[in-house]
Image (cartoon, rainbow, N blue to C red):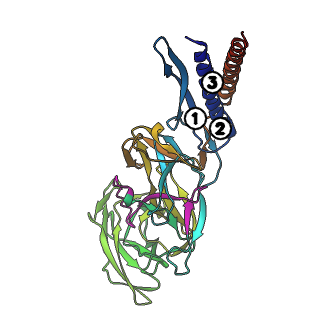
Amino acid sequence: MSIWGAFTNSSSAMMAQSTAMGSISQNVANVNTTGYKKQDTAFHTMLSETTARFNFFGVDTSQTTRVDVGGPVVSTGMWADLSVNGRGMFVVNSEIDGSGDTLFTRSGDFREQALDANGDGASETYLVDDNGYFLMGWQIDPDGGIDTPDDITSLQALRFEKAAQLEGTPTTRIAMTGNVPSEASRAEPMHLPCYDTAGNVRTLTLEWQPTDVQNQWTVTPMVSDGTVSNQPLTVIFGADGSFVSPDDATDVGITWSDGTTSTIALDLSGLEQLSGGMQVDSIDGDGNEAAWMMNARFDTGGVLSANYANGESLSLYQVALADFTNLNGLDEMTGNAFASTAQAGTMSLFSATSSGKAAIIPGTLEASNVDLADEFTRMITTQKAYSMNATVFKTTDEMTRAAGELK
C-alpha cells in the first residue's frame, strides 16, 4: 500500500468518527426527552480506491435508530399521559379529520386542546401531542360495541365534550338479594330505588303481607307519585327459606304522576326467608339519572371513558396501536415521531384490550432509552479513535512534505 492510502484511510476514519460523535451528542442531548429513541452508529470497511497493485480500504458508517428498545416507565399522575408496555406505537395525525400526515410515536405526553371543529360554537376537547398532532383511535358504540379494523382510515381523533350531560334513562329491570323475615306477622315494606323515563329518582315499594299459608306472601308493588297497574304477586319460599316462585321476573307497569309510564321487570329470586328483619343486601338494576360529566380517564386497555356525577361512565374511544415488521426501519421525524417507510415493512393496527401484545399504562410516560454511562464510554472511545487517525493523517502529511523536499 502506498503512502496515499494512508491519507484515504485516515481521512475516512476521521469523518466516520465525526459521524459517531454526532450520534452520541444527539443521544446525550435527549437523555431526558420523553419517548426518545437512541441512535447507534455501526462501522464497516469501505473500498475507497483500487490500483494495479493495491486496494485502499477506509471506513464508513451506518446509523440505526433503536425504536424497538423501550425506555423506563416514569409515573406522572397526569391522566392523559400514556405509555406502552410491550410492542406498538401510538398513532397520531396532523389533521383533526385524519386526512393529514399519519405518524407513530412512543411519546405519550398528550394534553387537552379545546377546538370548535364543527364551527357551531360548541368546543370539544381533543388529545394532542407536543407537535399538535391528534391521538387516533376507534370510536366505541353507545352500547359498548367496538370494531377495530386493520385500516388506518377507520381511525378518528379522540375527543369528548366536557359540558356534556348524560341523559337520564328509565329503569327496566331490578334484581336484588336480601332477606324476608320468616317470623313476620304483619305487612313489611321493601323500598327499591328506580328511575322514570326522564331519569328522575323514584321509589318502588313492595309491601310484603304474610298469608295464612306458611312460607307464602302476598306482595303488592306501589309508588307514592303514581299508580301501579299490577295485581299483587304471590311469592313462595321453601321450608329451608330458599326462594321457590315465581320462576320468572314479573313486569310491573307504572304510570307516574306526570303521565309518563315505566315497565320494570322485577326479579325476586335472589331473596331468602330467614329469621331477622326485612333487609335488602344488594340491588342490580339499570337506568340512571341525568348527570354532568366530571372527568375523562383511560384504562389499561387504552379505552377512553367519560365519568359522570351520578357514578355512571360511558366508553368513548379505543386507542389504536401500530406495529411494524421492522420498527427500526421507521423514518425519524421532529418531536419523537416516526413515519412509515418501505424498510419498516408492513404496518398492522391492534388494540391493547384484545391483542395481548401490549398494555397501556395511564398516568405514566416512557422515558428516553439512552444509557448515559454507555454513551460516555462510546464518547471516550470515539474521541481516542479520532485523535489517532488525525495523528496518522498528520504524520503522512509530514512524510509527503519530506519527500517533496528531496533534491
| Residue 183 visible to an observer of this rendering | no
Q: Which residue in the rendered view is the most extreme toward the front?
A: 407
Question: What residue type is disc 3 on?
Answer: Ser
> Taken as a whole, is the magenta stretch helix, strand or loop?
loop
Estimate the spatial distance between the alpha carbons at disc 1 and disc 3, rounded to whole Å: 23 Å
Check disc 3 and report its element: helix, strand or loop.
helix
Which is more N-terminal, label 2 or label 3?
3
314 above or below 73? below
404 relative position to 45: left or right: right
Residue type indicated by callout 1: Gln
Q: Secondary structure at mark 2?
A: helix
CB contact under 8 Å: marks 2 and 1: yes
Which disc, if any, is residue 279? none
Instruction: Indicate the quadrant where residue 238 lies.
Output: bottom left
Q: Which residue is mark 3?
A: 11
Q: Which residues are magenta?
A: 125-152
Q: Residue furthest left?
A: 247
**Measured Cα–Cα span from mark 3 to mark 2:** 23 Å
- Viewer-nearest of labels 3 and 2? 3
Q: Mark 1 vs mark 3: which is more N-terminal?
A: 3
Q: Earlier in the sequence, mark 2 or mark 1?
A: 2
- 385 with respect to 197 (left or right): right
Residue 135 on the magenta segment: yes
Q: Picture quarter containing residue 153?
A: bottom left
Q: Residue at x 73, y 13 (%)?
A: 405
Q: Nearer the viewer, residue 277 or 396?
A: 396
x, y percentage for residue 14?
Answer: 64, 25
Q: Which residue is mark 1?
A: 39
